[in-house]
Image (tube, helix red, strand yellow):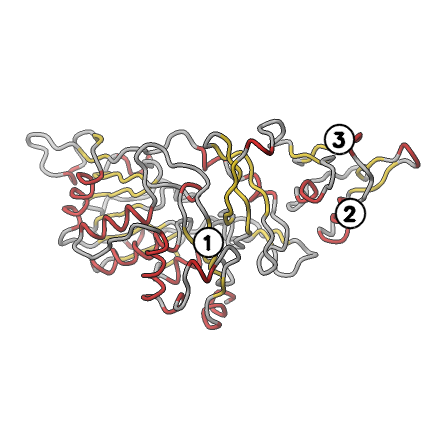
Amino acid sequence: GDVIYVTNRCILCTRCVRFMDDVAHDPVLNVSERGDRAVIGKFEGQDLTHPWAGNVIDLCPVGALLSKDSLNKARAWEMDRAASVCPSCSQGCNMMVETRDNVVVRLRPRPNDDVNKYFMCDHGRLNYRWLNRPDRADLPHVREVGPGQGDESTGRGRMRPTDFDGALIAAGRLLTGKRAFVLASPMLSNEALYLLSRIVKKTGGTGMFRVPQGDEAPLPGVDDLALRRDRAANARGAELFGFARADNPLAGMKSGDVLIVADEELAGVDNPDISAASAVIVVGTFLPRWAAAKTAVLLPIANMSEEEGTFTNLRGRVQRFLQAKAAPGFARPSWWVLGDLLSALGETANFFQASEVFAALAEDVAAFRGMSYGTLGLKGRAIDGAARAGARG
């Protein structure tokens, strides 16, 4: 697995052995040899590859168990830290994002008795490199319009960089009098999904999303804690804001719709068909290849480590995450960009902080009624009982 054992640091407290026996229910560790030769060992033919085995690194009191992934990347005192929520599945484990020189170098669990106790699965712990990807969109772009090329929706001409005002004006012009078909990401915050839902409502359009799937991996010794099948942080939030889940979310797009792509990956969908779209507006962290030829406007946004917001987990618990690092170039928080896009459509959306967007959605959406960033704190709060029952269903 990801664990290195440094023998001369070990004090044989056997915390790691007891965790694997009593919590993970995967007894692969033991105390080998006797007396002053005793060490922590593995049973023959077995490895420390349980999906939750990385927690032995956190519970070791002397640093005898280390992560191969983060070894020698940075000293503990060289890193900045921010409280966050794991985006890798719908469990919503609380975590700390640790950065050095504006690069995410490590994720660690943060205690929350109502969600993940003190633990974090290895998939969530090691799934952070996408937060540092180098091919980020950092400038707004619009489709260049030349003589005889018509408007931005023709798909001809090259993409050229511009400022946000110019890009938003172009996007507003494309959406005027047309339906928006919104491909939303279940990795977006509640704040961004709320504003996308208002764009859908404003244009009389449709909103869809798709959730990547994986095998469920529970931690047997902790009730209701698992790496979930839904490998996205906010699928429950997307449903609460009226977006429909589908395996092929673009199938419902109608001819002439303006496709707003707020989900660049579309993992598992081969060669998505966007021929029905009259134009494509990408609101994302990069320009996806499958949409590049028809994209008329690109609005760059921050990823979840670069902005503040909230996620709703599968049990209906709304939890805050904080900004851990700066976004590249001129990329802005997703809620900021979508609020400006809504303003370009004639709606009132003068938001200057994520908390203001959350206050607006708490007033408009019944499940969030009475919530605020102050009442959520850093432990979160569950939505009403009926919504929780829906989440469990």
Q: Nearer the viewer, mark 1 or mark 3?
A: 1
Q: Residue beneath label 2, please?
A: 27
- Identify the residue at the far bottom of this view: 386
Residue 201 is left or right of residue 11, and the answer is left
Q: Residues within 10 Å of mark 1 (few under 14, many from 20)?
A: many
Q: CA distance from mark 1 to mark 2?
A: 35 Å
Q: Residue beneath label 1, please?
A: 320
Q: Residues within 10 Å of mark 2 (few under 14, many from 20)?
A: some
Q: CA distance from mark 2 to mark 3?
A: 20 Å
Q: Residue beneath label 3, please?
A: 6
Amino acid beneath label 2: Pro
- Identify the residue at the far right of this view: 35
Going from the N terminus, do you reach mark 1 or mark 2 first? Answer: 2
User: In the rendered view of the protein, which quadrant contains the N terminus?
Assistant: top right
The numbered mark at residue 220 is none
Q: Please tell me whether mark 2 sits on a helix, a strand or a loop.
A: loop
Q: Tally the marks.
A: 3
Going from the N terminus, do you reach mark 1 or mark 3 first? Answer: 3
Q: Nearer the viewer, mark 2 or mark 3?
A: 3
Residue 23 is left or right of residue 227, and the answer is right
Q: Work out whether 20 lies above or below 80.
A: below
Q: CA distance from mark 1 to mark 3?
A: 36 Å
